[in-house]
Amino acid sequence: MTERIYFDNAATSHPKPECVYRAVDHFLREVGASPGRSGHRLAISASRVVLEARERLAELFGVDDSARVILTDNCTEALNLAIKGSVGPGDHVVTSSVEHNSVMRPLRRLEADAGLELTVVGCTPEGRLDAADLAARLRPDTRLVVVTHASNVVGTIQPVGEIGRLTRPRGILFLVDAAQSAGAEAIDMPAMGIDMLAFSGHKGLLGPQGTGGLVLGEGVELAPLKEGGTGSGSEHEIQPTHLPDRYESGTLNGPGIAGLAAGAAYVQERGIGAIRQRLRHLTALLLAELSGVPGVTVYGPRDPAKQTAVVSFTLAGMDIAELGALLDDRYGIMTRTGLHCAPAAHRTIGSFDRTRGTVRVSPGLFNTPEQVSHLGRCLRELQEHGAGPHGN
């Protein structure tokens, strides 16, 4: 049977560390109760799991108060909370041309329905945002700047520290989409001038799907995205104002958060520096392999020091959907093809109208150099001999 090679970690990291599987299983079997909903021993145990997750995440992102870590179902919910909770009619918002739809769709909705004024700053064909270009678009009425830390299409790392130094003195809220960078890049919110950090729990943080969060800097207050039961202040029909309850209505995903706490602990123990070094090495090997395949066009920085482990490419003469299917069916190599929920990014890098997207390869911590080399051999075989029939 063909070896299964998973190169889709930008969508969801797989496999997870063994400690994550154990933590989810333990919560379901031995804890099981709803955190913050009762006073019995199992509910208290569940609340301790949630607190551990908050504290580990706060430490990873340089935040002193773990109550400012708001747990959500995913990064998309966190971005919606941050955007819709911070801006109103007539506010001016600045973002970049490589954002994911989880940023662009809420902004476009508010632009159409609530009179939001939106400025989209163009990036280079490599997906790089120039902080000086963004500075030139800031206005006295700019309320919010939203920027992805790393592109989910080409991995380009944006100068968030420079942007934070622009927004902070002006009193402009700075929201960073860290879906691709949390757990893979060093993030210090206060040092980088980040007011709100949205993160995914199931990618670089190695937790289960259905986990994510929004970290609020000191002094940041938002209108809640939803209201309901929080387990606190149940005598009132008004949403609590204290954190994190103000933004966490409904029963939390206890098993998922247990796995997220374990994933964050694994990242802390291994170290962001060591993780980054490992992913840079795999990215360098991947770029070298792709450069040796005739007809391949690689998009983005093409420099492991300037991007996360996300590489997009096309192969001349081959439809990207067909190429992705062949890699899976014939060679057991799993990638992601298409527009990756980021049409603006593909327009920026030039792959929207030309090819309707790319093949995205995103190695993770548990991929090997041998697997990267195997991908190169398979692509050369496809290029030399043509597609032929599907199947193994």
Image (cartoon, helix red, strand yellow):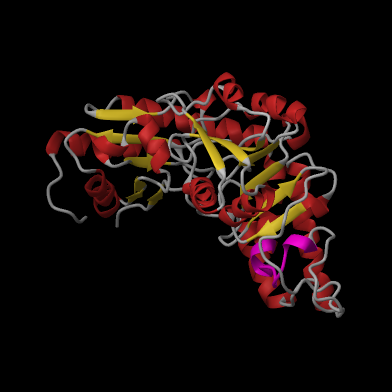
From what the image shows, is residue 103 above or below residue 385? Answer: below
Residue 72 location (% of width, % of height)? 65, 59
| Residue 250 within the magenta-colored segment of the rendering | yes
Q: Quadrant of the C terminus?
A: bottom left
From what the image shows, is residue 335 above or below residue 281? Answer: below
Decide which of 305, 289 is in the foreground and name it. 305
Question: Residue drawn 65% across and 47% down?
Answer: 87
The answer to whether one can see residue 55 in this image is yes
Q: Residue furthest top?
A: 132
Residue 242 location (% of width, % of height)? 85, 60
| Residue 287 within the magenta-colored segment of the rendering | no
In the rendered structure, the answer to whether residue 358 lies left or right of residue 309 reads: left
The answer to whether one can see residue 370 in this image is no
Decide which of 240, 115 is in the foreground and name it. 115
From what the image shows, is residue 41 above or below residue 111? Answer: below
Q: Looking at the rendering, which quadrant does residue 329 occupy?
A: bottom left
Question: Residue drawn 37% across and 48% down?
Answer: 336
Residue 10 location (% of width, % of height)? 48, 46
In the rendered structure, the answer to whether residue 308 lies left or right of residue 226 reads: left
Q: Quadrant of the N terminus?
A: bottom left
Question: Residue drawn 78% across and 34% down?
Answer: 190
Decide which of 289, 173 is in the foreground and name it. 173
Residue 378 location (% of width, % of height)? 26, 39
Question: Residue drawn 20% across and 37% down?
Answer: 381
Specify the segment rendered in magenta: 245-257
